[in-house]
Image (spheres, grey):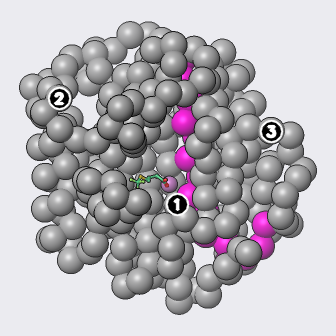
Amino acid sequence: MILLKSPQEISKMEKANRIVAEILEEVKERVRPGVETRELDELAEQGCRRHRVEPAFKGYRGYPSCICISVNEEIVHGIPGPRVIKEGDLVSLDFGVRYDGYYGDAALTVPVGEVSPKARDLLAATAESLDAAIAQVRVGARLTNISHAVQTVVEGHGFAVIREFVGHGIGRSLHEDPQIPNFGPPGRGPVLQAGMTLAIEPMTCSGSWRVRILADGWTAVTQDGSLAAHFEHTVALTDNGVRVLSRL
Ligand code: MF3
Ligand code: CO
């Protein structure tokens, strides 16, 4: 069941997502060679305290940290720790908060210094696929138009879409219906309506889309060790069109 939000609810979600975007921006600025990923988690945690919001991921199904940090072949759900970021890394940051009963959720991938041309292309293609997906969010369109747009852009650049993980509805819960796959034919699934709030999150890689979970029970990596990227925005569909809530 897809829960439609009132304009009042959407404005609360806008506040939650604005805080997500601000904290993500702050963490992104600190991503540089020599920093430990746990320092970035600490920064996200301080941001939550300062904004008086609850981190959305900590404790979610036992996830231990505020933010997910996934480096290079890590796709999503990387757990911050003593790992030291180095020049050339691709660092995916995924972060969410709860504010006034509503969730915000967003992700981005940061290149550390000079990265390979392939890495740069992967980032550009993944960001472009998210924009293309958001452009499909219109009243009366079908949900899988979003999925198809992501796949078309990503594969058009010669990259692959991860199939194990999906985007999702979001609101009073971090994960609501519908699930939003990042691949598949267009024209299927529910008809998009004003009041829907969706977290759209293409996860991609430069090789095969096969995934493996590390022994920590969380970190998803590409089986072939190829590079991965992840961008996510929470958007609201209103009578005036789509609003990207997690953009600064
Ligand atoms: N953006 C991810 C999601 O929507 C983040 C969840 S990480 C978890 O699933 F730790 F909370 F599981
Ligand atoms: Co999400």
Q: Disc 1 on helix, strand or loop?
A: strand
* Residue annotated with mark 1: 234
Q: Is residue 232 left or right of residue 137?
A: left
Q: Is residue 219 left or right of residue 180?
A: left
| Image height of 199 relative to 9, above or below | above
* Residue annotated with mark 3: 184
**Amino acid of disc 3:** Gly
Using the numbered discs, state the Cα–Cα distance from disc 2 to disc 3 in whole angstroms: 36 Å
Place of residue 189 in the rendered image (x, y in percent of width and height, measured from the top left): 84, 58
Q: Disc 2 on helix, strand or loop?
A: loop
Q: Is residue 65 magenta?
A: no
Q: Residue at x 50, y 22 (%)?
A: 222
- The mark nearer the N terminus, 3 or 1, is 3
**Amino acid of disc 2:** Arg
* Residue 121 seen by the camera: no
Q: Disc 3 on helix, strand or loop?
A: loop
Place of residue 184 in the rendered image (x, y in percent of width and height, measured from the top left): 80, 38
Tell me which corner region of the image, top left, top right, bottom left or bottom right, holds residue 35: top left
- The mark nearer the N terminus, 2 or 3, is 2
Region rendered in magenta: 192-206
